[in-house]
Amino acid sequence: MVVDDDDLVHLMSKRILSMYACVSNVYSAYNGQEALDILHQGCEGAMNLPAVVLLDLHMPIMNGFQFFSEVKEMECLKDSKLVTIMFSSTLDPADIEQAQSLGIDYFFSKPILLEKIESVFRKEFTS
């Protein structure tokens, strides 16, 4: 799932993710609330839950930290592994520290690059 308020990020991310055989569908959300709605639909069985979330930090309505805090409270996700990759246009040390304290798996600076995604997929999805 791609959670970002920028159309270009969605386009680039979908192109990168579609290169992986393990990715069958890419959901799009333009803020944290839309992403939560998608996850709730997945929890209700209306769609498959995503395995990976590419998450922007700064978005309207609900930012990346607020979204992730809500995700951690979702009972239906307690036993599932949702790999979260946060991207931000800033590298404020306080943001990086907050991401780590919340349990976000990866924090990268923008732009979203193929090499960054590849490194995560190698680590998380290959045995």
Image (cartoon, rainbow, N blue to C red):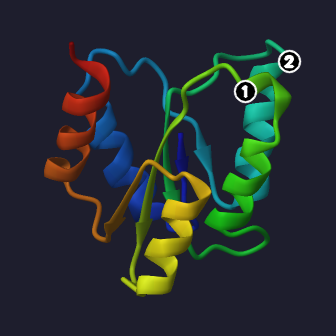
Taking 33 as reference, is 23 above or below it? above
> Residue at (18%, 39%) from the top-left corner?
118
Judging from the image, what secondary structure is the residue with disc 2 in? loop
- State which tag comes first along the sequence, 1 or 2: 2
Checking the image for residue 63, the label placed there is none
The reply to whether residue 118 is in sight is yes
- Marks 1/2 in contact by CB < 8 Å: the verdict is no
At which x and y percent is residue 108?
Answer: 32, 64
Query: On the image, numbered disc 2 is attached to which residue?
Result: 44
Left of 103 or right of it: where is 54?
left
Left of 22 or right of it: where is 44?
right
Checking the image for residue 78, the label placed there is 1
At which x and y percent is residue 64?
Answer: 62, 64
> Which is more toward the observer, 104 or 13?
104
- Crowding near the residue tagged with mark 2, few <14, some 14–19, many ≥20 C-alpha atoms within 10 Å: few
Q: State the image quarter where residue 98 is shown.
A: bottom right
The reply to whether residue 56 is in sight is no
Left of 105 or right of it: where is 29?
right
> Residue at (36%, 48%) from the top-left corner?
13
Taking 21 as reference, is 113 above or below it? below
Distance from the alpha carbon under mark 1 to that under mark 2 = 14 Å
Kind of residue indicated by mark 1:
Lys
> Residue at (74%, 33%) from the top-left corner?
39
> Residue at (51%, 53%) from the top-left corner?
104
Kind of residue indicated by mark 2:
Glu
Judging from the image, what secondary structure is the residue with disc 1 in? loop
At which x and y percent is residue 65?
Answer: 65, 65
At which x and y percent is residue 85?
Answer: 43, 51
Q: State the image quarter where residue 14 is shown.
A: top left
Q: In the rendered view of the protein, which quadrant contains the C terminus?
A: top left
